[in-house]
Amino acid sequence: MEKIDGNEIVNLMFLSMTDDKVIEMVDRLGMEQPILDENYEIEEVTKAGLHDDTGMFFTFKEIDGLSQDGMPNLTIISFDTDENVTFPYNLEYGDSYKVCCETLGRKADYYDDWMDENRIWRTKLKDIECGITLVFTDETLEKLDGLIIHKFREEHVGDSLIPNEE
């Protein structure tokens, strides 16, 4: 199987769960298609990875003013170790924080007060504030273990997100 480029997956951010591109990628990844329940809520869509705590997941939520068809949009993409998917942004599993900063062109904007092994870069995708959260194996930040693209939530700054002054 040809590896799926993580950047191709990131391009799906904020698209509707019914968008043909999202449906096609969910199929390519071997995930089940998202389904709304009777409360108009949706479960996370997951793909099992190399062992039980790895893989990918997509989270769909409704975003006011964004959805063209009234359906939930892709708001979180979580990349973990998966032999069939590359990390986006030219990052690689096992990169150190220093290498990640060089690759992304700057140091992280935030660290997570509750999870010392996370660093967050603020960016925009499709004119919407996003976060790129890099998850390292421990607080030494020597080995990149996962990556999460998510809609940025300003209310978390100063609460769990602390400005990075390293």
Image (cartoon, rainbow, N blue to C red):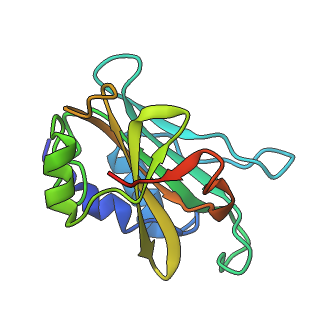
Residue at coordinates 60% horizontally, 57% vertically from top-left?
157
Q: In the displayed image of the protein, which residue is found farthest to the top? A: 52
Location of residue 7 with respect to 91 vertically, above or below: below
Location of residue 47 with respect to 166 vertically, above or below: above
- Residue 24 image offset from top left, x and y in percent: 39, 58
**Quarter of the rendering containing residue 18:** bottom right
- Horizontally, residue 75 falls left or right of residue 26, namely right
Location of residue 24 with respect to 135 vertically, above or below: below
Q: In the displayed image of the protein, which residue is found farthest to the front? A: 165
**Quarter of the rendering containing residue 8:** bottom left
Q: Nearer the viewer, residue 114 or 63?
A: 114
Q: In the displayed image of the protein, which residue is found farthest to the right? A: 39
Q: Nearer the viewer, residue 132 or 4?
A: 132
Residue 3 is at least partly visible in this image? no
- Horizontally, residue 92 falls left or right of residue 166, namely left
- Residue 158 image offset from top left, x and y in percent: 62, 53
Residue 2 is at least partly visible in this image? yes
- Residue 6 image offset from top left, x and y in percent: 26, 55
Residue at coordinates 36% horizontally, 68% vertically from top-left?
11
| Quadrant housing the N terminus | top left
- How many marks on residues? 0
Location of residue 155 with respect to 140 vertically, above or below: below
- Residue 55 image offset from top left, x and y in percent: 37, 32
Q: Nearer the viewer, residue 105 or 11?
A: 105
